[in-house]
Amino acid sequence: MKLFIDTADITEIKEMAAAGVIDGVTTNPSLVAKEGRRLHDLIAEICAVVDGPVSAEVMALNTADMVTEARKLAEIYANVVIKIPMTMDGLRAVRILASEEIATNVTLIFSPNQALLAAKAGATFASLFVGRIDDCGGDGMDLVEQVMDIYDNYAFDTEVIVASVRHPLHVVQASLIGADIATVPFSILKKMPDHPLTDIGITRFLNDWEGGTRDG
Ligand code: G3P
């Protein structure tokens, strides 16, 4: 399973890249706005740190403008993936970009039919927002299971990104279902190595070492 980091904070990206645990990066307009930097500069800096796919979102809402923005973003680095919102205009943009071999990530997917259309249009990735479904009283992981089945049934190449991840259990659930990717905020990636028994075990080993007799 691939893990992406869902952030535009270069310090967070560098910290996780140094541990070798991330395969790519996803950003969105909210995350980029928090950094207060020009999108193209920020994406260039991220791509210099991470070899894998780096998603950058277009702000246009009509097909022609989305494609223009996407082509400019795709020029930054070969690993830039264009994030396109799940609309009919977006699907048309995905089809054009796919014909130009520009990778896309269809975002804001909340239903199996949206995921089906994204795959048919030729999306490289489909981002399923599980946390926002859970927020509305639904079960985001049901959507992941359904979309994985649909993509398997018809051998679509589109990879499923489990997005809007809110806690470490979402990552476990996504991996048990067999989702291709989970994109995980820094705060949640930081929690994943933690276990109280690991801490207790380290303390106990240290105490035994200090209290014992040994050579050297
Ligand atoms: O980047 C897309 C997605 O992961 C956003 O998550 O927490 O704003 O629903 P969230």
Image (tube, grey):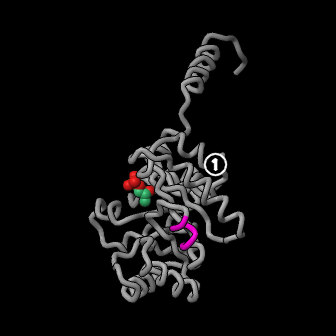
Q: Nearer the viewer, residue 56 or 44?
A: 56
| Residue 80, percent from left and from top | 50, 74
Indicate whether 45 appears above or below 23: below
Q: Is residue 114 magenta?
A: yes
Q: Which residues are magenta?
A: 113-118
Q: Is residue 191 left or right of residue 154?
A: left
Q: Nearer the viewer, residue 202 or 77?
A: 77
Number of marks in picture:
1
Quadrant in the picture for the C terminus? top right
| Picture quadrant of residue 182 | bottom right
Quadrant in the picture for the N terminus? bottom right
Circle 1 sits on which residue?
Answer: 175
Q: Which residue is found at the position 40% from the left and 82% from the top?
A: 66
Q: Which residue is found at the position 60% from the left and 60% from the top?
A: 147
Q: Which residue appears farthest toward the left when viewing the image? A: 36
Q: Residues within 10 Å of mark 1 (few under 14, many from 20)?
A: some
Q: Is residue 104 left or right of residue 108?
A: right
Q: Is residue 67 left or right of residue 176?
A: left
Q: Which residue is found at the position 54% from the left and 84% from the top?
A: 95
Indicate whether 164 appears above or below 88: above
Q: Is residue 179 left or right of residue 7?
A: right
Report ligand 1 position as a quadrant: bottom left
| Residue 207, percent from left and from top | 59, 15
Say what secondary structure mark 1 lies in.
helix
Indicate whether 91 appears above or below 3: below
Q: Is residue 115 magenta?
A: yes
Which kind of residue does numbered mark 1 sit on? Ser
Q: Nearer the viewer, residue 13 or 87?
A: 87
Is there any visible trace of residue 11 in the rendered image?
no
Q: Which residue appears farthest toward the front when viewing the image? A: 113
| Residue 10, percent from left and from top | 41, 59
User: Is the magenta region chiefly helix, strand or loop?
Assistant: helix
